[in-house]
Image (spheres, rainbow, N blue to C red):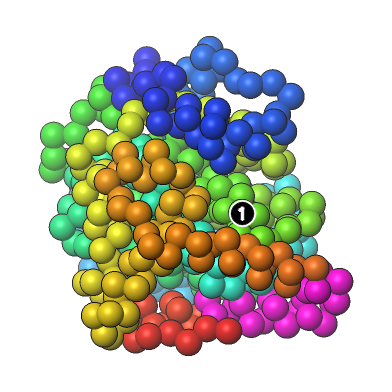
Amino acid sequence: MLPARFTYPSPGFSHYWNYGAGKKMLKQLDHIPQKESIEEYAKTLMEYDKTGDNVIAEVFDALGFHKANELVNNILDQGINNVNDVPESLKELFAEVDTVPEWLNWDLLETGSAFCQRTGVFALIVLRNYCLMGGYESSAINKPLIYTGALKKGAAKRITETMEFWVNATGKGAMKQGAIGFKHTIKVRLMHAFARHSILKSTDWDNDMWGAPINQCDMVATNLGFSIVFMEGLKRVGFKPTEEEVKGLLHLWKYIGYVLGIPPSYLPDTEKQAIESLYKWTMFQSPADEDTKALAFALMNEPILSNFPTHKWQKKLLIKLHLAYNYFFLDDRACQTMGLPKSKIWYLPYLAWLMNRSKEYVVMANKSLFNYSVRAGRKDHENVKRMYLRGQVPTVH
């Protein structure tokens, strides 16, 4: 059975694939998925991470959030074999994530990580203005945010949490057992399970309407946002990832998805598979509604409520900068559907493309410059993360 949110063909995303940025991506496929296979794909809207949910039911409900969170932190810091009286559900979860899958290739994963790092601040621009804002065009995937009160908590908190997770997960060696990205990913998995448990327990959420909250289908879509959509956004601002970097990026996010509790078979290994999965998900999405328009508007105005930039004129300029990239990535129709105004500095992304494309030829031809770009880009990521967490203005390379 499919939930009522299933809307085929999607009115908004049909335009994306037929006339927008997706048109070029779609040409890479040998065949375009039809309604039957899309309906089959959409059945995962009813699936969710049962292992994570068992932890919430057995541990968090029994001990309370703070004590349960302390127990999880102790396991992450000391290892599960060094912590006494661990409940069975936590043993099951850590037995899963501590098992390195046979398909994992660490060298390929680190290639994907290095690609994320070398793209510097443009990675964060793409994540914010393409991946995150673009996701608001779908009303259904964002319903859990509305039910958990994320809109009231503010876009600044939400974007800080997303950016911190992404930076922590994409550093060199970050996804090895015990490393910062690996630990953070497990915490995000439990946060998702806690949110799902709270929504079902405390709200009037309707599975028949929306599917399971934070379901596997939408989790895959989010994963694709961090991989194939992210990569396409960087291509559009002038970056030229190698074939190995494309494989590496998908491999990195396949492993992150695995730790998050997504079945590995649901995640792509190749660019074609990623495009096909993205197409299937987008083609049954209902259009933006008033809730998602409110989320988009909150993200647009995030600099106003943030602690940085300091001055009002800087905040206004930053909003115009982000809007320029919103229109550059998402096109007029999508942005206007979400109620986003146009920017007077619309031309800046085109100048960025020229700068990055010129730089790519030099960097990719010189190993020393390539390694420097990875180090400098990572420094920018850490700097921006630190400034978001502290509320200060970052200085980037």
Q: How far across and how far down the image is residue 271, in percent?
A: 69, 41
Q: Could you say which quadrant of the image residue 63 lies in?
A: bottom left
The residue lying toward the viewer, choosing from 305 and 107, is 305
Quadrant including the C terminus: bottom right
Three-letter code, disc 1 = Arg
Give the residue drawn at x 26%, y 63%: 301
Mark 1 Cα shell of 10 Å, populated few (<14), some (14-19), many (≥20): some
The residue lying toward the viewer, choosing from 134 and 250, is 134
View extreme (top): residue: 36
Please tell me whether the stretch drawn in magenta is mainly helix, strand or loop: helix
The answer to whether residue 250 is seen in the rendering is yes
| Left or right: where 144 falls relative to 242 | left
Give the residue drawn at x 57%, y 15%: 34
The residue lying toward the viewer, choosing from 214 and 359, is 359
Q: Which residues are drawn in magenta?
A: 362-381
The answer to whether residue 56 is seen in the rendering is no
Q: Could you say which quadrant of the image residue 191 lies in?
A: bottom left
Give the residue drawn at x 33%, y 31%: 287
Q: Could you say which quadrant of the image residue 264 lies in?
A: top right
Quadrant including the N terminus: top left
* 283 up-or-down from 246: above or below: above
* Secondary structure under the numbered disc 1 in the rendered image: helix
Per the image, is 275 magenta?
no
Q: How far across and how far down the image is residue 350, in percent?
A: 57, 61
The residue that mark 1 highlights is 236
Q: How far across and how far down the image is residue 280, in percent?
A: 53, 27
Give the residue drawn at x 31%, y 39%: 337
Q: How many marks?
A: 1
